Image (cartoon, rainbow, N blue to C red):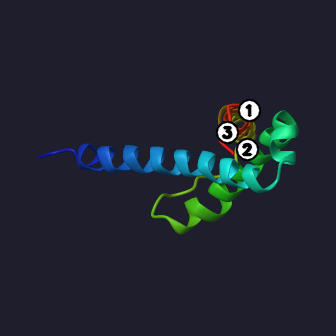
């Protein structure tokens, strides 16, 4: 019998990257209208990462078929740090670099 996770892994991976690129795209497009997003890229990018964490954790995941486990402080802190330093900050720094390179 085949493992069902093997069938769902490729579309799940593709969806993950689609969502990630969309998150970066939203920040970039917003930064084209609000220059403050690139002027204060570090602080606002990190704040954006926190917002992304809460939207994904408390809106997107509950609306999906994925189950959500019990609250765990270490998992919560890990999620905040990953989304702050690995999602929001890179999105903001990308937007700032693209703006400086003349993408406006």
Marked residue nearer the N-terminal end (2 or 1): 2
- What SS does tag 2 mark? helix
- In this orientation, which residue lies closer to the viewer: 34 or 93? 34
Residue 25 appears left or right of 79: left
Say if 27 sits above or below 67 in the image.
above
The label nearer to you, 2 versus 3, is 3
Circle 3 packing at 10 Å, graded few (<14), some (14-19), many (20+), is many
Residue sitting at x 73%, y 44%: 49
The label nearer to you, 3 versus 1, is 1
Q: Are marks 2 and 3 in contact (CB under 8 Å)?
A: yes
Residue 38, horizontal then vertical, whole percent: 81, 40
Residue 1 appears left or right of 80: left
- What SS does tag 3 mark? helix
Q: Are marks 3 and 1 in contact (CB under 8 Å)?
A: no
Q: How many marks?
A: 3
Say if 62 sits above or below 33 in the image.
below
Alpha carbon of mark 2 to alpha carbon of mark 3: how far?
9 Å
Residue 93, horizontal then vertical, whole percent: 72, 32
Report which residue position mark 1 lands on.
100
Say if 78 sits above or below 49 in the image.
above
Circle 1 packing at 10 Å, graded few (<14), some (14-19), many (20+), is few
- In this orientation, which residue lies closer to the viewer: 5 or 17? 17
- Residue 91: numbered disc: 3
- What SS does tag 1 mark? helix
Q: Residue furthest bottom?
A: 63
Report which residue position mark 2 lands on.
49
- In this orientation, which residue lies closer to the viewer: 9 or 96? 96
């Amino acid at each position: 019998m085949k493992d069902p996770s093997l069938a769902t892994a490729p579309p799940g991976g593709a969806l993950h990257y689609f969502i990630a690129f969309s998150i970066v795209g939203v920040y970039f497009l917003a930064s084209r209208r609000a220059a403050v997003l690139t002027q204060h890229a570090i602080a606002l990018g990190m704040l954006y990462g926190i917002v992304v964490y809460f939207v994904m954790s408390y809106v997107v995941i509950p609306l999906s078929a994925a189950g959500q486990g019990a609250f765990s402080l270490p998992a919560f802190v890990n999620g905040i740090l990953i989304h702050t330093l690995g999602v929001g900050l890179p999105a903001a720094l990308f937007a700032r670099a693209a703006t400086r390179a003349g993408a406006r």
